[in-house]
Structure formats: structure tokens, C-alpha cells
Amino acid sequence: MPTPEFTLGPNNYGKSGVRLVRVGRESSRHDLRDLTVHTALSGDLDATHYTGDNAGVLPTDTQKNTVYAFAREGVGAIEVFAERLARHFVDATPSITSARVQIEEHAWTRVGDHSFTRGEGGELRTTEVVYGGGAVRTAAGVRDLLLLNTTDSEFSGFLVDEYTTLPETDDRVLATAVTATWDYAAEAPDGAVYDSAFYDHAFTRARGALLAAFADTYSLSLQQTLYAVGERILKTIPEVREVRLSLPNRHHYLFDLGRFGLDNPGVVFQAGDLPYGLIEGTVRREAA
Amino acid sequence: MPTPEFTLGPNNYGKSGVRLVRVGRESSRHDLRDLTVHTALSGDLDATHYTGDNAGVLPTDTQKNTVYAFAREGVGAIEVFAERLARHFVDATPSITSARVQIEEHAWTRVGDHSFTRGEGGELRTTEVVYGGGAVRTAAGVRDLLLLNTTDSEFSGFLVDEYTTLPETDDRVLATAVTATWDYAAEAPDGAVYDSAFYDHAFTRARGALLAAFADTYSLSLQQTLYAVGERILKTIPEVREVRLSLPNRHHYLFDLGRFGLDNPGVVFQAGDLPYGLIEGTVRREAA
Amino acid sequence: MPTPEFTLGPNNYGKSGVRLVRVGRESSRHDLRDLTVHTALSGDLDATHYTGDNAGVLPTDTQKNTVYAFAREGVGAIEVFAERLARHFVDATPSITSARVQIEEHAWTRVGDHSFTRGEGGELRTTEVVYGGGAVRTAAGVRDLLLLNTTDSEFSGFLVDEYTTLPETDDRVLATAVTATWDYAAEAPDGAVYDSAFYDHAFTRARGALLAAFADTYSLSLQQTLYAVGERILKTIPEVREVRLSLPNRHHYLFDLGRFGLDNPGVVFQAGDLPYGLIEGTVRREAA
Amino acid sequence: MPTPEFTLGPNNYGKSGVRLVRVGRESSRHDLRDLTVHTALSGDLDATHYTGDNAGVLPTDTQKNTVYAFAREGVGAIEVFAERLARHFVDATPSITSARVQIEEHAWTRVGDHSFTRGEGGELRTTEVVYGGGAVRTAAGVRDLLLLNTTDSEFSGFLVDEYTTLPETDDRVLATAVTATWDYAAEAPDGAVYDSAFYDHAFTRARGALLAAFADTYSLSLQQTLYAVGERILKTIPEVREVRLSLPNRHHYLFDLGRFGLDNPGVVFQAGDLPYGLIEGTVRREAA
């Protein structure tokens, strides 16, 4: 291989949007799992970039096949399924040294023994597992969990400059679509075993903590709500070491009805679309 | 006005995507309503088209204001709110002879006295009310109600031509996103009063009938399921005179695992996206 | 078949979202066509709805196969390809009496003998052909053709009621995403032959007429612009008998800079999203 | 402030989706600029997270106002506008130590002195400027630039494992939607001045290099194409020090027409949607 003029930096490749539906038929009361899987592999891939020599390239089509094949025997919690896949890609492929597997789970609610409708909340359960160098890092979370408080939210005392026209408010609608990701410690502090039962139970409790913190925090800023949510998850799940949150502020504007001789004591709002505030932050068990 | 060279045919104008959120504060346990309203007016509008004379044009901005102003005192069932708006636009505006008001309601589930998350099913409740010539026509429905059966669905005995390669199947996944619209008779057969209580109750029963018919119909074709759903709604709600259904067939392909030495007895599926089948039909109480 | 309790009304079924890309390799300078095809058949389909007897049902999968098979020998103008497909489905299938074929064409611009990038305008070229009872109806059009005028648009003299707060304006930005559909007369008035050359040439001229009418009409209302566009297409293409237009009014709000000691003489605008005005109308060669 | 139980990690907040349209009226031949701006500020924001004390919080509404106010005098190249904004937020706000401003520019093509339609390529021009600690980092790029080659693409010689079923191919359609980001060196090597003229010219040349590299590279893998594109940009623009590329592989499947007695010598393809391959990589002027 001739020396290339420039240098290949960080790179990865994989299959995105692998849509997997699995029906569990152990009894006449079927189970339903609905996942979207994304794989991304990296390793010794210089040759395909520099010269098109694909000897070290496991096709993305193969990665897709692997997802479906591995699902045959069951998937378990998405964190566990992602780890199975990530370990396989690294351990079975000489050229691959690291694998990232992301999964989103779409919720379904049972309406019959073999009938289902879309679950509530509108959100996806997510995971991201990275395996490489013998170590596994596992994150879990939710994407676009819609939440709205009709009161107990203020915004005042903020910094005012020459471009500030926003009035202070002591009662506003607070609406958001939570994307949260929490990292599990490599070593569980209480000796918990990271299996499907653990992850499912932890997810349920973390989601519950998130909802509760949103609902019962009297909010002086969306940042304060963000911290409260992160704090609540850390308190609830000792195995979590860090929570990352992205909270769009879906503005609801009180509609001016005074022009029509009507009052509007926090009743009629115009839901905004663009632009929206975006508050992002991290809450950690220990200082960095 | 000079005689124009061509003729203005059917036309309407209005405001689309009016995002209305209403908080009911009658008690500390707040109510939350979340609507998207679309208005469309028609009448004597030749002048604005031919010469730009807007004397008969009630601005779309005014239509939007009216939606918010009318929401101040409450909205009730969306069918009733749509009718209030439609009647107002026609009755108060000399140039307007007909109004169509469409509303979609986004569901929220309570998680606290003033806290909410998105409701289940992923669907919108819809209505369309047309008022003109002294008459009101009211339709109600759902949009994109996700449903999936893991079994009890066959497709066989179909017409085969030179381009047919589809194998027959006696067990498939049947998944769809139901859009249903049902028309209420102008005169309720049992003397029911078309008020908010009626519409809310009828909607709940119609949605329940839809889910039940989907879940308990052994399906030989999606058309058969469509008819069964329409039939069940008509049986359940005597005031409904016609049901229109649009059922995309969200194909789930059994993944070929035999290449990897695995069987796949209806367990692992690839959810398809494009293309999709689309089955549309109408079920009526009486013959047309 | 037992007598069903209710009546099947209008119905159709077909395949939506058939994504067809065709490469013309007649020379080393390849041609590229990129279509999305939707089929919808109707006919004697009572049995499948009432009892699940599919003997008259040509599978939607077969319809998809037919699209790809017919593309082998070439597609020509989308109007012609749609008609070929529609005629086939009716003429070759005893149970089918009517077929509607809709096609959207995605534009590509050449950047090399075999290299392409997405074409300008952001819009789709569309057609809808309905064949049944021995007759063909052909419509053509564009979807979401983005257009914006920075001036020469007023809106004043409109009807004012108690909910009207919109100020009059004598200079505004006028922006829209045109969806236009024009019907071709069954008999071409000048004896034109409805072949691919005709349709491609007519489309180019109609699109040009649309752009020119939008650009050079001094607009007193979006309705006036709508009529002007329809009129221009009718004047340009004698074979067109009717033009239907749907024009969302993509509002651009002059941003209030006076609060910061700045003037804003029609320079800085906030592009709105929801809600939007929606103006729909029809312009016909002859009175209805 | 009491000691919080947990630690606030990396965080930022700002306004996303600020839709700015600017009309240049220096002559009767108007200019049109159409930008979406996203701001994200960070600094000493512990208090608002821990206690809801907003004294250091410049409202996101103010950030939005600033975007519009700064646009009054002109925007120039988006790289320059982003830097003006980023510097302002840090330099004028004591609590803010770092600002990231991202801008997407939507292209319009002139069709008249004051009339425009959407430009070709379907892509957005992008920039990201980060200012903090006295230093500016400027990146530019494109998002979703659609490209398709009908030939001169192979994929063979790849790694085969037990889940590999993909056949080798020596002629395939290669289609992608390029997202590319290139970083400009802090010091221009040839003493270039980083002004609007520089950035606009560099963007045009980089985009041209990207298209040319895609069109004239005989591709043995999408990774090879990725490297070729990065290499071409680095060769063309000496001020660029690194190019990051994200290339979805938009699969086009040769449709099996043999079942219908037809050959298919690379003519008829089914364009796939999900899943898609995703190839991501970095090409650098110097080794890391």
C-alpha cells in the first residue's frame, strides 16, 4: 500500500435502522418485542479507506443478518441484547476492535392474547453498549418522553441585557420531550448482577423517578428541573453513575384575549413549535 | 369587474395548524386539552381571486384568533367545539356560506394533579364538521391508531397472474395504523342529543369496538378486517350511518434464518417500511 | 354468501410507496429516473370484504412486481407509464373495473456521465391517471414547489370583525409551497397526441408558466396569485381544462427591532411554521 | 447554597430553530438569505441548576432577539455571522464563558428580481463556531447532499462469516446523502483572511471538490469514496485541517425480473429505505 497523502482519523461503519419484531409464542398469550437496532464497528480499517481492499470489512448486510439470527433464541432486556451483539462483532471478527450497538424499543400495550396497540408516553426506551479492549460500557435511557406541567413553574430573576424583552412570569406551562441517558457503573456497588431482570427493573424505576421528579418539583428554571430529574434517578438507582439530559423547552404562549374583552388567567395557550429552548446537562454521582 | 377569461371553480381558504392548549383550573386537579384546529371557509369569494378585492375576506389570522377566543369559556367535545366555530364563521360573516372545521386532539395521560404525559395508542382523535345551507354534518374518528396481531391472520386463495410471486400464508403478522372516520346521522335514531357527553361516550365506545373487532376477528384478508371493524362500529353506535376506513398494511416479513441453520416458526420478523399495502373502504348502515 | 348486515360502499386497495429507480444504459451517458408509484384498484371486491374469499384479489405484492416489470422496457413520461399500468390492471384482471395510478418523480441533476445530485426547486413532479369504463383521465402537476417573493405583495381592505387584529400591509413577503394539479382534456383541442414528448413538453411549459405568473403578478391576495397562476397555465397549455391549486401561506413576520433602537424596513423576518394560511382553488377553462 | 448531593457535569442551554429570513434591498434586485440558527451557551450556571437562581441566565428568548437584531446590518457568510454571535454572547455576558453557534443555510435560486425558488442539491450549508477562552474554532459543511452514481462502484473481497449472505458485486448503484464537516485551521497557512469572501469561496470550492471526487472515483467501497472525498477537499482548500464525513449507504436493490422472463442488466432497482449502511470517518491533514 503506497503511503497516502493524508491520515485516516476516527471512523466506524455499520447498519442503521434494522427493524426487528419478535413474537414470543411460548404460550397462546404471545409476547411482542419491537426494536430498531444500529450497529457501528471500528478497528483496523485503513485498507478499505486507502485502497478499497475489503478483506477486513464485515459487510453491514452481515451485521443485519446477525441481529435477526441472534434474536431467534430471545432478546431479553435491550441492554443485554446489545451487549451480546457487541461482544460477538468484536470477539468473532479479527479486524474489529470495538463495537457500539444502539437499540430503541417501541412500546406496545396488550389488548388481547395476540393483539397489541402502541404504548403510552410516546417515547422510546433506548440503550447504547460499547464493547472494546475487554470492557463493556452500558447506557440506558428514554427518547422523547413527553411531559407537561400546567403550573408550579416560574421563570424570573434572570439576567437582562439590551436585547432582553421577555417578561418575568410566576406561573407558566412547562412542557418538554425528555431525552435521558444514564450510564451504569462498570461494577455494581451492591453486587447486583447486570442481567435482563436487573435492567428491566432499573428502567422501570428510573422512568418512574423521572416522571415523579418532573411532576413534584416546583420549577424556578428548566435547568433546576433537569438537575432534579438527574438527582432523582441517581438516588433511585445506585448502579447509575451519571445521567445526561436534553430538555427542549416547548414554549406555550399565553394567548392575548384582552383584545376581545376576555381575561386569560392561565387558561388558553398557543403551543409554539420553532424556535424552542434547549437545556442540556449532566448530573454525576461523583465530581468529575 | 371585467369578465375574466377563465372560471373560478371550487375554492376555500382558512388557517391550518392552529395549536391550542387549554388548561382547566376549576380545581387544583387541572384538566388539559391539546388540539390542532384547521378552518376552511367558502362563499362569495370571486372578487379576491379575480381582482384582489378583499372586502369579503375574513383574514385567516382572524380565524385563528376566533379559535383561541372561543376556547376561553371551554371546548367540550371536539365535535361540539368544531360546530360552534363553523356556525360562527357562517352566521357572522355575510360573504361566507360554508365552513369546514377539522380538529385533531392529542391525548395526554395524567401523572399528577397538574402533570401529564402523552397518552397511549399513538393516535389522534379527530373530527370534521361542515356547516352550510342551514345544515350540519359531523364526522368523528381516529388517525394512526397502531394495531398489531401476531397471529390469526391468513392470506391465500388470491388471484394469480404472470407477475404474482407471493406465496400463500396461513399465519402472518397483521399490523396497521388505522385511520377511521364515522359520520353521525343528521337525526339521531333514538332521540339522542348530540352534546359533548354524547360525543365523548360515542367516541370511547367506537374506539373500543374498533380495537375489539381487530383483536377478535380471524382475518382472511385485511379487507375482511376492514369490514369487520366498520360493522362493529355500526352495531355499537346506532347514530353512526357510515364508517370510512384506511388501513395501511404494514408488512412484517418472516426473516429467512434457515441460511444460518435456524428455524423461524413465526418468531423473527423484519418490519417493512416502503412499499406498503393500502386498503380503503366504506361500510354503510343502508345501501347507497 | 349470507346477506351481510351492512353495505360495502366505495373501496379500493393497492400498493403505496413503490420506489422505482431506473438506469438507462443506452450510452455511457446514463439516464436516471426516480419514481414513487402508488396503485389503487377497485371492482368486484365484495367477497373478500364480506367473507375473506380472495378469488378476485390481485395481491398488492403483484401490483408492485408489475411496476418493476413494466419499467424494464422504459418508462417514458410518468403520465404514460401510469396509463400503461392502469390499463393493464383493468384489462388483464377480470374482477378489476377501475385503476388509479399515482406517480411522483424525484428530480436529479446531472453532474457527470453517470453521476447525479438532487434537482432544484425541492418539488416533485406528479401524475394521477384513472382508467375505467373505457375512459382515461390524466392529471399532472407539482407538489411542494417552494416559491418566495420578497415584495410586490399587499394584503388590505379585508373584512374586519370583532376578532380581527391583523394590520393591513402594503408590502409583505409572500412565500408558499405550491401543489398544483392540472387535468388534460380527453380530446386534445389541436389534435395533439398524448405521448411522452407531449407530456414532458407540457410539464416544462406549465411549470414555467407557474413560476412566471408567481414572479410577475403584483399580489393583492394569495387568492389573486392563485387565480393568476391557474390562468397562466390555462393560457399556456390549450390541452389543460382545469387547474387545482393548494397554496399554504408560509407567513414571514417582520421582526420588531424597534425595541433595540433599530429600524426594520422590510429586511429582517421571522419565518413562521404553524399555523399557516391555506388557500385552495380551481381555475377552469369553461364554467362548470 | 447548600452543598448538593450530586455534581453538575457538562451543560449548556440556548435557543434552537431560530428561523431568520433576511431580504437585502440595496437594489431592486433583492437578495434573499434563509437561515436556521441554534445557540448554546455555557459558563457559571451552577446556581440555576442547584437552586433555581437565574441571575446568571441570559434567557434563550434574548438569544433569539440577538440573532434578529444582529441580522439588521447584514449577515455575510454564515461562518462570520455565527462568530459575531458567539463572541457577543461570551464577551457581553459575565456568566458565560463559551458559546457554540450552529447555522444552517437553505439555498434559494433566483427566478426574478424579487422572486426565488428552492435551490438544487436538496442540501443545507452548515457552520459551527465555538468561542471560548479567547479562541475561535470554525467548521463548515453540508448536510444531506444527495448524490448517486449509476455505475463504477463494486463491493467484493469482503470478510465472510457464518452470517454473511451478501453476494459480491462488480457493478452497483452507489447513492448517499452526504453530511460533511470541515475544520478550518486557527492560522491560515497562506495568510488568508477569514472573512465572508473567503468562506463563501472556500465553501463553493469544497462543495465542488466533494461532487467531483464522488463522480470520478471508481469505488471499491463506500469507505474508499469517503477517503477520496476527504482527500479532495484537503487538497483543494489548504486552510482545512480535517474533514469529517457521514455517508449513509442508500441501498438500491436490483429487482429480480427473471421470474417474469425478463433480464435486468443493471436497469431496474428498488430503492431501499430501512435499514441502511452508515459509513463515518475522518480525514486529516496531519496524523493525530
Image (cartoon, coloured by chain):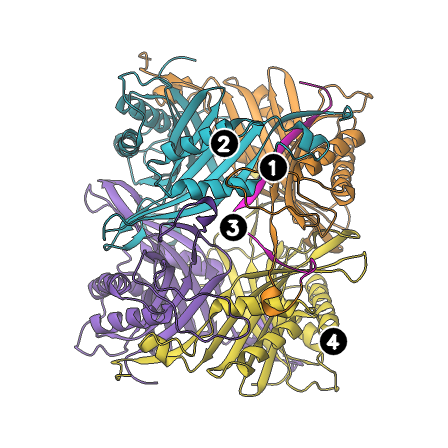
Chain colours: A cyan, B purple, C yellow, D orange
**Residue C198 bears which disc, if any?**
4
User: Can residue A271 be seen at all in this image of the molecule?
Assistant: no
State left or right for residue B175 relative to residue C277.
Answer: left
Q: Amino acid at mark 1?
A: Ile
**Quadrant in the picture for residue B244:** bottom left
| Image coords of residue A258 (percent x, y) | 37, 49
Going by the numbered disc 4, the residue's amino acid type is: Phe
Callout 4 touching callout 1 (CB < 8 Å):
no
Q: Are marks 2 and 3 on the same chain?
A: no
Q: Between label 1 and label 2, give the one nearer the viewer.
A: 2
| The N terminus of chain D - image quarter | top left
Does residue B76 show up magenta in the picture? no
Q: Element under label 3? A: loop
Q: Determine if the magenta segment contains residue D265.
A: yes
Chain label for disc 1? D
- The image position of residue B221, as x and y in percent, is 36, 69
Quarter of the C terminus of chain D within the rendering: top right
In this picture, residue D19 sits left or right of residue A103: right
Q: Is residue C215 left or right of residue A265?
A: right
Residue numbers of the magenta segment:
D264-288
Q: Which residue is mark 1?
A: D279
Q: Local crowd at mark 3 within 10 Å, few (<14), some, or many (≥20)?
A: some
**Which circle, 4 or 1, is nearer the viewer?**
1
Q: Which of the two discs, 3 and 1, sits closer to the camera?
A: 1
Q: Residue at x 68, y 29 (%)?
A: A47
